[in-house]
Amino acid sequence: MPTSSSSDTGATGAAKFVTSTLGNTVGGLSRTAGNVTGAASRGLGDTINNAAGNAGRPVGDALGNLGTGVENGANNVAKGVENAGHIPFRMRFY
């Protein structure tokens, strides 16, 4: 017995594979870029806090919080892109 459904063959199956693979790749790259940016911004913020003390704390905290926001936003975008690749795909010819 075949293990794949009839909707996973031919052009539709190929389109599903490409869409899923592309979505997962772009999502992974977006997540990586967000994580690197977030970590770098938090690290820079911590450095400013340690070097400048209380005088630099507002700037250091702002940079750290900005990095966390960018990281969270990139992770949400990545999740959406990856999920878009898993939506059932139907080719329609009109």
Image: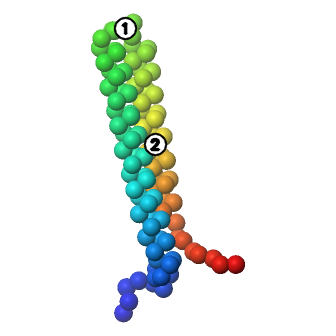
Residue shown at the point (40%, 46%) measured from the top left? 31
Q: Which residue is mark 2?
A: 74
Name the mark nearer the viewer: 2 or 1. 2
82 lies above or below 35: below
* Badge 2 element: helix
Q: Secondary structure at mark 1?
A: helix
Q: Is residue 21 depicted above or below 4 in this figure?
A: above
Question: Which residue, given by chain and number where applicable, does mark 1 sit on?
Answer: 54
Image coordinates for residue 79, horizontal then vertical, percent: 46, 52
Residue 84: image x %, image y %? Answer: 51, 60
Q: Position of residue 81 (x, y in %)?
A: 49, 54
Seen at 29% across and 14% down, the residue is: 50
What is the distance, in whole Å, between disc 2 and disc 1 at their CAs? Answer: 30 Å
> Going from the N terminus, do you reach mark 2 or mark 1 first?
1
- Tag of residue 83: none
Q: Residue furthest bottom?
A: 1
The N terminus: image quadrant: bottom left
Q: Residue at x 42, y 23 (%)?
A: 63
Three-letter residue code for mark 2: Ala
Q: Are marks 2 and 1 in contact (CB under 8 Å)?
A: no
Tell which residue pokes out farthest to the top in this image.
55
Classify 10 Å Cα crowding around label 2: few (below 14), some (14-19), many (20 and above).
many
Say how the picture is coloured. Answer: rainbow
Whether residue 86 appears in this view of the structure is: no
Count every numbered label the image shows and give the total. 2
Residue 44 locus on image (x, y percent): 34, 22
Q: The disc labelled 1 sits on which kind of residue? A: Asn
